[in-house]
Amino acid sequence: MLANCNLISCNFTNVALINLRPRFPFQTQTRSIQFLPLLPQKSCSAVTNRFPFHNKGGPLICHSVMNSENSDKDEVLEGEGTQKEERDWTTSILLFVFWGAVIYYVFFLTPDQTPSRDTYFLKKLLNLNGEDGFRMNQVLISLWYIMGLWPLVYSMLLLPTGRSSKSKVPVWPFLVLSCFGGAYALLPYFVLWRPPPPPVEETELDKWPLNFLDSRLTAGVSLAAGLGLVLYAGLANGADWREFYQYVRESKFIHVTSLDFSLLSAFAPFWVYNDMTSRKWYDKGSWLLPISLVPFLGPLMYLVLRPSLSQMHVSESLISSGKK
């Protein structure tokens, strides 16, 4: 039996009062209907599918979160929040497939015509062989030392703004492995990465490694070293470049290293964008995104010009004190 119930139509702004009390008492079997608080007109369409007995064109009963004690626990809001937090695995799956294809290519499809020469080149680059009068390719030497700087560049981009808070997978093991495996070791972390990054405590900024990786001095020295290596390769004559191209076609070691450099250069602009937005510097630093497309030097340019985390904490504290 329904008594003095107000029904509201979401198609009209006026509230119609209908007296549903019967004139004569009678007995009937009715469904138990739970009446819910009233909701403003704009939210009615979002909850119409929650009532299985709703007829088209009939009155709607809507939820309300205004002036409600339990508004934080409203089912509609909780449902929407859950949908937003659900992870889209498409990107991770594509990255995993891409990583698997790259690994398969590296082990089975890359050229391997000169294994003995590759061993000799590796020993020469590691300074394990004495001076024997052989002149190493100038472009290859430059590429070798640039690959040694890439892990430092990615460490400055991924710590701390590239950390993963939801997957609870630490980034530092992958950064350590990247010193030996390059992009082939970093790609699994890209698959498992789930933003946003965890908050950074102010005490962490003065401790290693954040105080080293977030320093402009570190970025400036890396940029100067990178410019020197690029200039060293650029000054190589045409014979060195033709010889290096022949090495890429024949040598597994040099072919895999060149592919590693290309992969690191391709993924770096995304992490520049991620770091930029995490530092809330996109409005001022967006012009650096096209520059980050320049292999190796572009990301280093961003690392030199970006604001430090300590400056961000100071500015945020000033803003909060001003509001108070």
Image: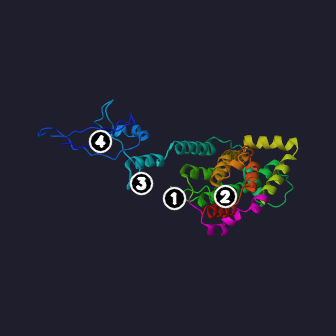
Is residue 135 left or right of 16 when viewed as pictured?
right
Using the image, tell me which numbered label, if any, was put on residue 133: none
Question: Pointer 2 and pointer 1: residues touching (CB < 8 Å)?
Answer: no
The residue at the point 79 percent across, 44 percent down is: 244
- Residue designated by label 2: 155
For the residues labelled 2 and 3, the Cα–Cα distance comes to 39 Å
For the residues labelled 4 and 1, the Cα–Cα distance comes to 50 Å
How many other residues sit within 10 Å of disc 1, few (<14), some (14-19) or many (≥20)? few
The stretch in magenta equals: 198-220
- Residue 144, percent across and down? 76, 53
Q: Which of the pair 1/13 is nearer the observer?
A: 13
Residue 101 appears in the figure: yes
Nearer the observer: mark 4 or 1; the answer is 4
**What kind of secondary structure does the magenta stretch mostly adopt?**
helix
Nearer the observer: mark 3 or 1; the answer is 3
Q: Which of the pair 313/152 is nearer the observer?
A: 313
Looking at numbered disc 4 in the image, what kind of residue is underneath it? Asn
Q: Is residue 255 above or below residue 12?
A: below
